[in-house]
Image: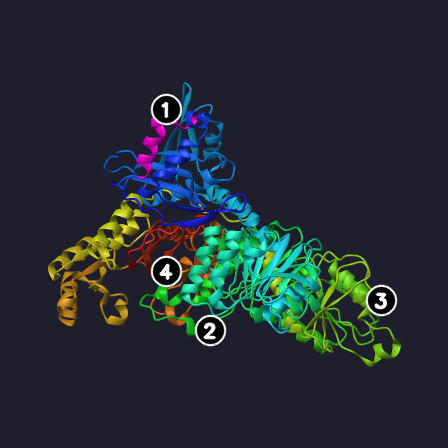
Amino acid sequence: MGATTHPPSEVHALLADGSTVAIRRARPDDRGEVLRMHEGMSQEDLRLRFFGVNPLYAREAAARICAPARSGYCALVAVANGRVDGVAEYSVHPAGRDEWPSADIALAVAEGRHGQGIGTLLLEHLVHAARDAGIRTFTADALAENHAVLQVFADLGLRTSRHFEGTEVRCTVHLEEDEHYLSAVDERGRIADVASLYPLLRPHSVVVVGAGRRPGSVGRAVLRNLRAGRFGGRLHAVNPHARAIERTPTYPSVGSLPFTPDLAVLAVPATAVPDTAEECGKLGVRALVVLTAGLDHEQGAALLATCRHYGMRLVGPNCLGIAHTDDTVRLNATFAAHRPLPGRAGIAVQSGGVGIALLERFSRLGIGVSSFVSLGEKYDVSGNDMLQWWESDPGTDLAVLHLESFGNPRAFSRTARRVARSMPVLTVDADRSDAGRRAAASHTAAAATPTMTRQALFTQAGIIATRSIGELVDTAALLRTQPLPAGPRIAVVSNAGGAGVLAADACVEAGLTVPGFDDQLIRELLADLPPGAAAANPVDATPAVTAEQMRACVDRLAADAAVDAVLVVLVPTALATGSGDDPLQALTGASGRRTRPVAAVLLDQDTPVRLLTTPDGPAIPAYAEPQQAARALAHAARYASWRAEPPGSVPPLQEIDLAGAAAVVEEYLAAHPEGGWLDPRACAALLGRYRIPQLPWAWAEDEDAAARAARNLAGPDGRVALKAYWPGLVHKSEQGALRLDLEGEDQVRQAYLDLRTRFGDVMTGALVQPMARRGTELFAGVVRDEVFGPLVLFGLGGTATEVLADHAARLAPLTDRDVHALITSPRCAPLLFGHRGAADAVDLEGLEQLLLRLSRMACDLPQLAEADLNPVVARPDGIVALDVGIRLLPRHAHDPYLRRLR
C-alpha cells in the first residue's frame, strides 16, 4: 500500500510564549536558511542531532530537506521573521502490500529557540501530514543522552515505546489519536493562547490611532473612555494634526511614537487600515483592535496577512472595542456610552449592539464584567480564545458568548466542554427558524437542520443556550448568585394561591417538576404558617403571612431533601402594607447561606430582573414573571445535571478494517471523481469494514438471478423483498421501486419483470433480501456539515421518519455518554426499553455499537458526506440495517484539533 503525502499549506500557530510562527512545507528556496540554521547550531547540538560533528552533515541535511517534493517524504519548516527556526521531516519505510507505512523522523531547532515549543508544534503538524498519507507509526533514533528530544517525544501525548541499543535509543511513536493526545494538545494550545492575549487584555501601554479632534469621533470616544477609566499603563494617541487630544500626548504617526505600545486601537478609514497595521507591526506592537468597518476583501486580507507576518493578535475589524476591569488594568478601549461595572462575568460578542445591551444590563443588575471583547468580524480572536482566557483568569467565573458564526466548532466544543466543568458558559441560540432547512435528498440530510446541529454542539459541550438576551440575563442572575440545584424538583411558595399556581405551571412547562410533599413536611410547614394556609406544593401562605413566618417556611423548604430549589412568589397586599410586615423581608432580611437556590417572583416589579441583597448571604434574583424564573431554574438544573455526570470517553472498537474501508472509498472516487451515492455492493462492503450489521442480500441483474437468490436467501417463512436499483436512487418507497413479501420463485421473477418494465434501462439491477422479522423500526445516519463536521442522527425510522421528525443528534466522535443520550432522547425511546411490559427491551448494546461504529466511520473517512440507514430493525436478539445509502465526496482530511490560527 503506497503512501501519498498531502502536506499542509502555510499556516500560522502560537508558541508557548504567545509569539507566532508559520508552519509550511520546505521549499528549494529555503536551502540557504536551512543551512544557516544548522550551521548556527552549537557543536553539542550538532553532535546530538547527527551523532557526530562534520560540516558535511549540515549541507547534506539542507539539500535533502529542500529538494523538490517527492513521494514518501515530507519536510516542514517553522518560519519567524523570515528565518527558519525549526525543521521536522519524515521518510517512509518500504511497506508490504497489506501493511500500513511507517516513517523515520528527524527534528532540529535553531540555536537560541529551544524551550518555546517549536519542536513540539512541528511534530504535531508532521503527525497530521503523516496520518493523511496513511502512515501509522514514526520511528526516531537518538543518543540516549539526548534527554531534550526524548522528553519532546514523551510529552507529545502519543503512545511511545523505547528500545535501547548501547548508547542509542530507538523511539517508536504510534500516531493513533486518542483522548490523551488531544488533551495534551489542548493544554499546549491553552498556554500559548493565553500568553498571546496578554498584550491585548492586560496591556502595559496603549495607543489610539485615529483619535480625532472632533468630539464625536469614534477614536476620540475610545481615548476619552481610556482616560476616564484611569487606564493603568502608558497612553498615547496618533493624529497628524494635533499634539494633544483629551489631555493625551499625540504624535503624527505610529512610527514617531517614543515607545512601542503593547496594544494599538485603530479608528482610521478602511483604506488606511492595511498601511497603519503595517506600521504597527514594524514598530513591534503585539495586538490590534480594529474598530473600522467597511473593509473590502483585499483590505481585509492585507490586514490579516500583516498581523500574521508580525505576530500581532487581532480583534475586529468592525467592532465596539475591548475592556478589562481589573483594578491593575482598568482598560476601557470601547466607544460604549458607559463604563462597564467591574465584576466576574466574561463577555464576548460579535454584534456591537448586543455587546452594548449586555454591558448595560450586567452593570445595571450588579453582576458586572471582568473582561469584554467585541469580536466584530472575527478575523483572528474568537470565542474559543476568550473561553481559554476566562478559564485561566481567576477573576472570571461566568462566561457569556453571543456568536453569529463558528470558525472551528469541533475545537470550540472541546474547549467549551472543558471550561463548562469549572464555570457556566451561556449563549443565545439565534437563527432557530426552519427557514434554514435546506432541500436534501436523504432522510439524514433532511433531519439535520442547522438548529439541530447547533443544539447538538451546545448540549454536548454543556453550554447553556437561551432563546433571547433577556433569558440569558435572567439565567446569569441566578447562576451568579445562587448554588446550583441538585435536580429539577421545585418548591413553590406564595402569599396568593393563584400566583403560586401560575408559577407551578410555568415550572412544569419549563421541564421542571413540582412534587407533592410528604405528610411530615406538610405538618411542619403548617406549624410555621398562619391559619388557612395550604402546605401542598405549591404552598399558599395566604396574604396574612408575616416576614418571620415566610422566612421559616422558605428555610424549611430549602433544607428539605425532597426539594432542589425554592421559588417564592409575592404579590403586594393591603395586609402587608398596613402592618408594615412585608413578606419580602423574608428574603432581604435573611441571614446566612442556604444550601439550595432560592429565587423570587415579584409580580409588581417594574424591571425584568433585579438582585435582592441580603445582610450576609448571597443576593437573591427577583423576576417580574414566573416564566422568567422557571426558565432560569430549568437552565440551572440541566447544567447542574450535565456537570454532575463524569465526562464521557470514546470507547475503543474492535474489528475495524480501516485499510479496507479506505480502499473502498479510493476505488469509488477513482471511478467517480465528482463523488456520488455508492451502489449496494459498495455500501455493503464499506459497512462490513466497520462490522455494522446488515440483512443478508444478493445482487441480481435479471429475473432468473433474482429467483436463484430468493431460493438461497428466503427465511423460515420463505418470503423475500426485491429492491430495484439505479445510480442516484435514494427513496425506493416513494419511487415504487420496492416489492415486499414475495413468496416463491415465480413471484420473484414476475416482480423483477414488473420493475424492469416500469423503470426500463435506467434500472441496473435489484437487491434481493429475506424479509426481516418484526421489530422496532429505527433510523440512524450521519451527515457531514461543512462547518461543524459529522453529525450522527438517531430516531424513529420507516417511511414516516421525516413526517414524525422524532430524532436526536450529536456531533461525532460520540462518547459513551453521547450514545446514551442519543438513544434516550427521542420520544420513541420507551419502545426500546420494553414500554410498560408490552415487549422485551431491544438489544441496547448492539444499538450502541451501531451508533459508535457509524461515528467512527464518519471520523475515519472525510469523504463520507452522508450515510442513511433506514430502517434499522431493533429486536431483543439483535440489530440489523435493512436499507442503506452512502454518499461520498472527494475531500481531504481536516484535523479540527490541529493547532493553527484562523
Q: Is residue 96 left or right of residue 44?
A: left
Foreground residue among 412 and 590 = 412
Q: Which residue is mark 1?
A: 54
Q: Tell me the CA gap for discs 1 and 2.
A: 68 Å
Q: Which residue is mark 2?
A: 433
Foreground residue among 232 and 18 = 232
Instruction: Tell me which label, 3 or 2, sits earlier in the chain.
Output: 2
Q: Secondary structure at mark 4?
A: strand
Please state, as top left, top right, bottom left or bottom right, where the C terminus lies in the image: bottom left
Q: Is residue 836 visible?
A: no
Residue 548 is marked as 3
Count of labels shown?
Answer: 4
Which residue type does callout 3 highlight?
Glu
Instruction: Kindly report which numbered mark, 3 or 4, lies closer to the viewer in this rendering.
Output: 4
Q: Are marks 1 and 4 in contact (CB under 8 Å)?
A: no
Instruction: Tell me which label, 1 or 3, sits earlier in the chain.
Output: 1
Residue 53 colored magenta? yes
Q: Which residue is mark 4?
A: 783
Q: Secondary structure at mark 3?
A: helix
Which residue type does callout 2 highlight?
Ser
Instruction: Identify the residue at the far top of this view.
Output: 166
Please identify the quarter of the rendering in which residue 474 is found.
bottom right
Residue 103 is marked as none
Please state, as top left, top right, bottom left or bottom right, where the N terminus lies in the image: top left
Foreground residue among 662 and 634 = 662
Which residue type does callout 1 highlight?
Asn
Q: Tell me the CA gap for discs 3 and 2.
A: 48 Å
Q: Is residue 610 visible?
A: yes
Instruction: Tell me which label, 2 or 4, sits earlier in the chain.
Output: 2
